[in-house]
Each structure stands twice: as structure tokens, then as C-alpha cells.
Image (tube, grey):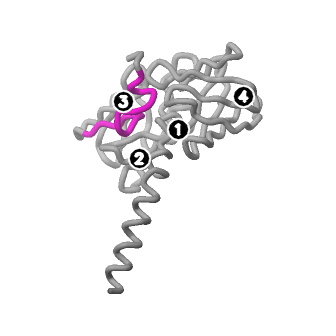
Amino acid sequence: MRNVIVSSLVFLAVLFLTPLISSSQDFGISGIWYHNSTQTHINVKDFTNVVLINESGDRAVGHFVNPWQIKVPGWNVVGNIQNGGTQISWSNNTTWTRYPSGKTHISGTWYHNNSPTSIQVYDNGWRFSITNESGQTSDGYAKSSRELYIPSLGISGNVNNDATRIRWSNGTVWTRNPGGSGPLSSPEE
């Protein structure tokens, strides 16, 4: 009887938590952004809590109106996520991009087979650290704005033009979006 009660409680917990887990997807926009080559930042906590930091260091909390639009009441702006998730056009006529001055910017959350991975860029964009889906960390460097190399693993990666996909030489692919929903599969594409 005790096992039946425990199994029932676990089942109910899974049923209760599943909607919360599915609504916490960040649609691939968490990370560093740029406005006029100055860093900004987005941290998606869940669908209704998106923390933004502008180029002046001011913080505000926003929320998704839909997977392609963010509303930030504290700044009185709405942002439209465009160009495969690499640009946000704000209602105050400003634009945030994933990379400054035509450079590819790869920092932030990535996904391999729907599992989160990440890349953190440092040393003026020439060096980076990756964390794979198993939590293993490796350092690498950029050979160019589109070619990455990780010496300890002996693999290289090619970044596509809009910095939404990395094809690694070991056959794996990292994308900005885990499962086909959100700005990377918006109607614009």
C-alpha cells in the first residue's frame, strides 16, 4: 500500500510540474546582446520573468507576449525578436543584436539534441569556454569569426552566418533553439 501511495504522489508531482517546466524554455535568447557595440544582457528566468540589462546598466523585468515578442513595462517598450533570434527591434527605435559591428557573437545558451550547452567568450572575443550537455568544460579559441577550435578535444566548429548553428567536426551540431519553437522557427523563416 505504501508503494502505491508513493507512486501516486510522484505521478501527481510530475503532472503538476510538467507545465511549469515546459513554460521555462528561454527560446534561445538568454545571454549577451549588443546595442551600438555596447553589451546588453538578457536572462530568461521563465516565460513571465525575463531580466534585461541595457547598455547603461539599467535593469528591468519583462515577459514574453509570445515566443517572438518581449514586453518590458519598466522601460515602456516591446521588442520583436527577428532574424532567426539574432536581433531584437524595440518599440523605442533601438535594436539589440547578438554580435557587435558585424562580428559573430556566440556567448550564451546552446542546445545539442535538446540538451542545454553553453559558450562563454572572453579575451575580446578570441577565446571561449564551452560546457557540453554532460557538464564537461573545455577551452578554445576563434580562428576567425566563423571558425572555432578546441585543442583539448581536437575538434573545430563552423558557425553559420546568423550565429544560430555550430557544426562541430566530430559530427555534432549545436543550435540556439532546443526543439523547434520560439524565434528560431518563427514565421519569418
Looking at the image, which residue sits at the far bottom?
A: 1
Place of residue 43 in the rendered image (x, y in percent of width and height, measured from the top left): 60, 41
Q: Which residue is mark 4?
A: 55
Among the two numbered marks 3 and 1 on one chain, the one whose residue lies closer to the N terminus: 1
Among the two numbered marks 1 and 4 on one chain, the one whose residue lies closer to the N terminus: 4
Q: Marks 3/1: CA distance?
A: 16 Å
* Dominant secondary structure, magenta: loop
Q: Marks 3/2: CA distance?
A: 14 Å
Q: Indicate whether 148 appears above or below 131.
A: above
Using the image, tell me which numbered label, if any, was put on residue 121.
1
Q: Is residue 42 left or right of residue 105?
A: right
Q: Marks 3/4: CA distance?
A: 26 Å
Quick one: label 2, few (<14), some, or many (20+) residues within 10 Å?
Answer: many
Among the two numbered marks 4 and 2 on one chain, the one whose residue lies closer to the N terminus: 4
Place of residue 161 in the rendered image (x, y in percent of width and height, measured from the top left): 39, 19
Residue kind at label 4, given as amino acid type: Glu
Q: Which residue is mark 2?
A: 116
Circles 1, 2 touching at the beta carbon (< 8 Å):
no
Q: Is residue 133 left or right of residue 50?
A: left
> From the viewer's perspective, is the residue at label 1 or at label 2 nearer?
2
Circles 3, 2 touching at the beta carbon (< 8 Å):
no
Q: Nearer the viewer, residue 122 or 35?
A: 35
Instruction: Confirm whether the magenta stretch covers residue 41.
Output: no
Q: Which residue is mark 3?
A: 165
Q: Indicate whether 180 appears above or below 90.
A: below
What is the secondary structure assignment of the residue under circle 4? Answer: loop
Q: Marks 4/2: CA distance?
A: 27 Å
Residue kind at label 3, given as amino acid type: Arg
Circles 3, 4 touching at the beta carbon (< 8 Å):
no
Residue under the point 63% across and 35% down: 41
